[in-house]
Amino acid sequence: MSGGNYYVPDQSRFPIFMAFSLFLLVMGASSTINNLDDPTNNSVYILYTGFGCLFLTMFFWFRQVIKEHLAGLDSNQLKQSYVFGMAWFIFSEVMFFAAFFGALFYVRTFAVPWLAGEGAKGGAIEAIELWQGFESTWPVMSTPDQGNEFVLADKSMAWPGWDHALEWLPLWNTIVLLSSSVTVHIAHLGLKNGNRRKFNIFLGITVTLALIFVGLQAAEYYEAYAHYGLTLNSGIYGSTFFMLTGFHGFHVMMGGFMLAVMLARSVFAGHFEDHDHFGFEAASWYWHFVDVVWVMLFLFVYIL
Amino acid sequence: MSAVIENHHDDHHHGPAKGITRWLYTTNHKDIGTLYLWFSFAMFLIGGAMAMVIRAELFSPGMQIVEPEFYNQMITLHGLIMIFGGVMPAFVGLANWLVPMMIGAPDMALPRMNNLSFWILPFAFFILLSSLFMEGGAPNFGWTFYAPLSTTYAPPSVTFFIFSVHIMGASSIMGSINVVVTIMNMRAPGVGLMKMPLFVWSWLITAYLLIAVMPVLAGAVTMMLMDIHFGTSFFNAAGGGDPVLFQHIFWFFGHPEVYIMILPAFGIVSHIIETFSRKPLFGYASMVWAMLSIAILSFVVWAHHMFTVGMPLAAEIFFMWATMLIAVPTGVKVFNWVATMFRGSITFETPMLFACAFVVLFTIGGLSGLMLAIVPADFQYHDTYFVVAHFHYVLVPGAIFSIMAAVYYWIPKWSGNMYDERLGKLHFWLSFIGVNVTFFPQHFIGLAGMPRRYPDYALQFADWNMVSSVGAFLFGFSQLLFLFIVVKTVIGGKKATDQVWEGAKGLEWTVASPAPYHTFSTPPKVD
């Protein structure tokens, strides 16, 4: 709360352009997905156009906001609005992951044991001899219909035991991502102390670690699809595994992209001051958030 | 682009831009509020037309005017449009108009994002409505889109439905972030948290609920999308998932959503009752705490929508008691409204009529909710017209009456003109009678066992269904009168004073009527 001069921007074309881009994006996505088996369908170009327009609108919109900031239009109060806004945005992302973690906990605690005949509900399933021979384990490698509709996997991504720990990619991914949270923090300290070189170097390391993470994740997916037979079609284990790690990986890419933009702004444009760098701080908050999600994933998807 | 930067010094003093671009490119909270309100009115009429189709079909037993497949599309779209297109945008529109003025802020905290939140909606509903013309028809699985109806057995347009829900969710989340940030960061000096007008409090809590649950809905529709097109088995028991999981995720969103549609109404009604009783609101602090309790409890009651689906007994009992607990803070609120009116010098202008009807009829809806909360009784009531009567009592004479009350109450401030009091009262009485004639009989046919979501019914339900349909046509066509009154007020009418209502208190009544394009560019002093 402070007095006066809160910057209220004049008319802007960005919002409606962005809404229209989103419209193209989702129309294109819907018709593409509905026509996946029709090779003559061209709606994927609408999808690309929408994505391109979205990207361009965001680029110019952020550029405008940065310009306004450099022109000194942002009062401390407006900066505080960005801080609150980012915090609540991250909260909404937490809730998005909560839906998928909730699904994971539900199937592990209730659905799979019931389908295998445990408990009162499972007794009812057992009594009508539905899903006979299905065992409740986690990771569950079979499906209640014994792979009738689904393609069963040979191997899960779970903890392979100490003997094989070093060949286990998720462990390396954990090390990479946890270190990147440290390096982004060191970069932040460097910026706060006015050490631009340290900031650039450690932010560069962080972005590199993000790329390594995404690369390792791609290798892991390749291994799953090519060697383990573990796919989206492998029943509930494959579903939860790929959706949770997939959305996390997507968020790592977004967070890594944000940090890369911050790096470019610092290196090429000399943006950010020791006391004034919320753009970077927001991206680093986001980065810590994807890191925490990974720790949860590592515990509940891989280890336990 | 740099023009914007150079011109910023006189931004705050000039009026709206000319022509259509005023509405397309605006960053003004009042313009955006107006856009939201007109959009929601349009959706209200479209969703209402669908309700008319439903009631025409149910006018007498047997198949009358539409095919069962089309009937299913009507009930689905009616629910989705009224909730996501009617009630929610109306409340966001009111928040846009009122929150900055009530807390003495120059605008919403993030004005451009504010416009983005709005303009997503017309596109989202264009997609949703266009599904009516797609192969296989529009979504036909009910607004709750339970799997496997919405996955295995869904029409192809479900993909479009999923993505339109995605962008509606993005719009809601951005809109809510804007409201929360505005309230947390933009209050004029002296407007402490416990001095905020109750509408502002109600929206702070609502926005928090929205940010918490809209992403969960996005997660639910994403899992549907993956199940339908990419071979996952979240909601497919054959692959180790569970269709009931869908219901859990959906209602984890859905129950807070119910409160999202009623909390702002609580705020509105508190203001109106206070003004027309010419007394300070009874129990301000308890009103705030009641809303907070309702919001927190809303996260732990979701499974009361699913008592008959087969849950462990302990879960049924937990969700029954948690649900009943909500009656306590809700009772506090009803008590406070009545206590505010007690020994007040009450006058019954149109907003007050709607607010009084709200208190009585919402309480009826709340009490039938308590009946539904009782597990063994719910086994009888589940999926009958009793449920339909219950949620229409809380949504139509609840949420929608509060929105109409708000329009009558604040339209002099928005337009500078008084509405026609005689026509307003006529609109109220037609709506009041229409609503009760429509929905009260549905309690009877529901308790007698008529299931919801069928285009035909057994003969013993014929009389009350006909009564209900007559009431629905009365209510439906009365809303054209509302449209007429609003347009008439915007065009002209008796000039409103700044305070408008004798008993009105609050910052929005200190500015001119109509409110200037920019208000509180410098924060007012509030003691």
Image (tube, rainbow, N blue to C red):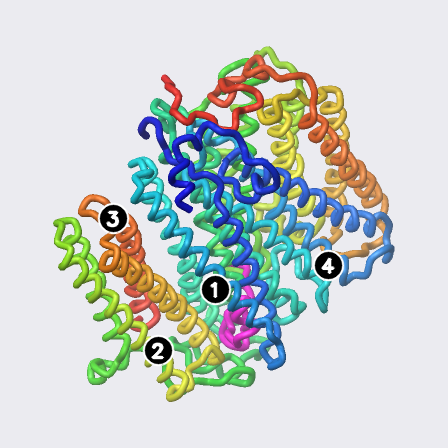
Provide the major secondary structure of the magenta segment.
helix
Q: Nearer the viewer, mark 3 or mark 1?
A: 1
Residue A151 at x, y percent in the picture: 49, 85
Q: Which residue is mark 4?
A: B72
Residue that appears at 66% across and 19% down: B349
- Compared with B138, B256 (above or below) is above
Q: Amino acid at mark 1?
A: Gly
x and y percent of residue B338 in the render?
57, 22
Element type at mark 1: helix
Rate crowding at label 4 as few (under 14), some (14 to 19) or many (20 or more) other CA atoms within 10 Å.
Answer: many
Q: Which residue is mark 3?
A: A277
* Marks 4 and 3 close (CB-CB < 8 Å): no
Q: Are marks 1 and 4 on the same chain?
A: no
Query: In 3D space, how far apart are the residues under numbered discs 3 and 2 (Cα atoms)?
Result: 33 Å
Q: Which residue is mark 2?
A: A218
Magenta range is B224-248
Comparing labels 1 and 2, the label whose residue is closer to the camera? 1
Q: Dot 3, how many residues are within 10 Å of its Cα: few (below 14), some (14-19), or many (20+)?
A: some
Going by the numbered disc 2, the residue's amino acid type is Ala
